[in-house]
Image (spheres, rainbow, N blue to C red):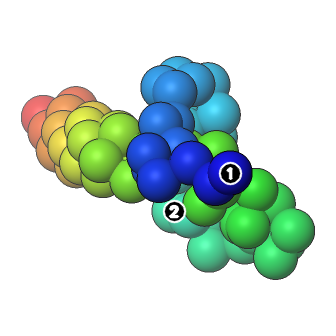
Amino acid sequence: MTDDVPHKRKFAFLATVSAVLWAFLGVRRRADYQKDIDKLNPLHLMAVGLVLALVFVVGLIVLVNWVVA
């Protein structure tokens, strides 16, 4: 008997951050990418990606203001 309920994915914080950071670099093995797709929740990936992008931009702004000032 097959289960019609979709597989629920857990929120694995470190695995999600790791996947997003690898995506920022643009370097990821296909096997690891497939494992991330199977294991991680896309909404969590988008949320962590947006937060890390915001942290990166704010960090650059702070760095430029510190160097210029």
* Image quadrant in which you'd find residue 35: bottom right
The residue depicted at 57 percent of the width and 48 percent of the height is: 3
Q: Earlier in the sequence, mark 1 or mark 2?
A: 1
Would residue 38 be seen by someone viewing this image from the given angle? yes
- Where is residue 48 drawn, in percent x and y? 35, 39
The residue depicted at 68 percent of the width and 51 percent of the height is: 1
- Where is residue 18 drawn, in percent x and y? 64, 40
For label 2, count other residues whose C-alpha is less than 10 Å away and answer few (under 14), some (14-19) or many (20+).
Answer: few
- Where is residue 9 drawn, in percent x and y? 51, 36
Circle nearer the viewer, 1 or 2: 1
Dot 1 falls on a residue whose secondary structure is: loop
- Residue 24: mark in rendering: 2
Q: Nearer the viewer, residue 12 or 51?
A: 12
Q: Is residue 41 above or below residue 2?
A: above
Q: Nearer the viewer, residue 44 or 2?
A: 2
Mark 1, residue position: 1
Dot 2 falls on a residue whose secondary structure is: helix
| In this picture, residue 54 sits left or right of residue 48 | left
Q: Nearer the viewer, residue 63 or 9?
A: 9
The quarter of the picture where the C terminus appears is top left
The residue depicted at 87 percent of the width and 68 percent of the height is: 31
Q: Residue flagged by tag 1: what amino acid is it?
A: Met
Q: Nearer the viewer, residue 14 or 7?
A: 7
The residue depicted at 64 percent of the width and 54 percent of the height is: 2
